[in-house]
Amino acid sequence: MLIDQYARRFTYLRLSVTEACNFRCNYCLPEGTDCDTTRRAQDLTLPEIRRLVTAFAQLGTCKIRITGGEPSLRRDLADIIATCKAVPGIEKVALTTNGYRLLQDLPAWKAAGLDAINVSVDSLDTARFEMITGHDKLQKTLKGLALAEELGFSNIKINSVLMRGFNDDTLDDFFEFVRTRPLTVRFIELMQTSDNREFFDRHHLSGMSIVERCLARGWQERERSSHAGPAREFFHPAYRGGIGLIMPYSKDFCTTCNRLRVSSDGKLFLCLFADDHQNIRSLLQADRHHVELLNYLQSTVSEKSISHNLHQGNTGSTRQLAMIGG
């Protein structure tokens, strides 16, 4: 099992398959992707992904979330999904996407074995969506979400980054959106990275204000499952959908950490905001390295720190969230 010195068990792997992204979100890549063709050529291959996921599964990982960058920029994304889902022990394969290719590719992803999908929607207002992302794609994204419902996805989430001055005055739109739809909107606190310090200082908004709003309106908090992500989830008997909050600056946020990350070029991230990362690419080159990979993962995870240092302004070596998928 993957267990650290604080008795935290890691059953959830967030696997980035590319750093490239086709959106220019103001909190992440306002100037567009900095991932050139050479770096994209260094993305993990299907055999490497199979070896990686197999090792994690044998060490107790049961959930894989495929992230980016924007993972749909990988033309072999359906094959990646199928490869992950075929590994014994993997119970759930999820995907986080900006929704750009939902209408074209979601049926193929579902056929490949995709179980759950998270779509980034930072505003339900067309003009604000374009201002935040750099693209006038809100209506296309919403049609993709409707398609996900039609295809029978039962675990659809919308990710919305909380930003003072951009979407904090339109949050009621999201509450109304889930009144009749079986979706969960997850508000995510803006996180500081090495490339967005000034933006963070101007626009960070605490998620506790949303928690207080939920409780005041009769929402009730769900019990957190052992394999869940970091969100606090809320439900309301008068709403089909739910509300979630991811608040990395809240007290004891890291206490229940159950996830590890691997970048698209094969680096193990013990924490999203760690200073150093372990390059495991060499152990993914052949099946004969399997036992060595298992042993390395176990020994390395034992060194995971008890918490990130975001409260002290230490963002580690994370330049922007596209490099590892948040």
Image (cartoon, grey):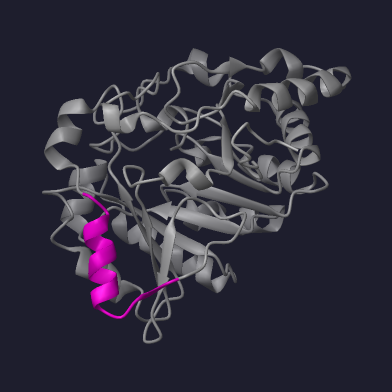
Asked which quadrant contains residue 262, the reply is top right
Q: Position of residue 36 (x, y in %)?
A: 43, 17
Q: Residue at x 68, y 26 (%)?
A: 45
Residue furthest out toward the bottom = 238
**Is residue 210 magenta-colored?**
yes
Residue furthest out toward the right = 288
Q: Is residue 216 above or below residue 296?
A: below
Left or right, 152 with reference to 249: right
Q: Is residue 143 above or below residue 287?
A: below
* Residue 204 shows in the view: yes
Q: Position of residue 166 (x, y in %)?
A: 15, 50
Asked which quadrant contains residue 241, the reply is bottom left
Which span is picked out in magenta? 206-221
Q: Residue at x 70, y 52 (%)?
A: 112
**Is residue 207 magenta-colored?**
yes
Q: Position of residue 109 (x, y in %)?
A: 62, 53
Asked which quadrant contains residue 295, the reply is top right
Q: Is residue 325 above or below residue 111?
A: above
Left or right, 283 with reference to 231: right
Q: The N terminus lies in which quarter of the figure?
A: top right
Q: Residue at x 73, y 36 (%)?
A: 56
Q: In terms of depth relative to the viewer, which is nearer, 152 or 163?
A: 163
Figure disc tally: 0
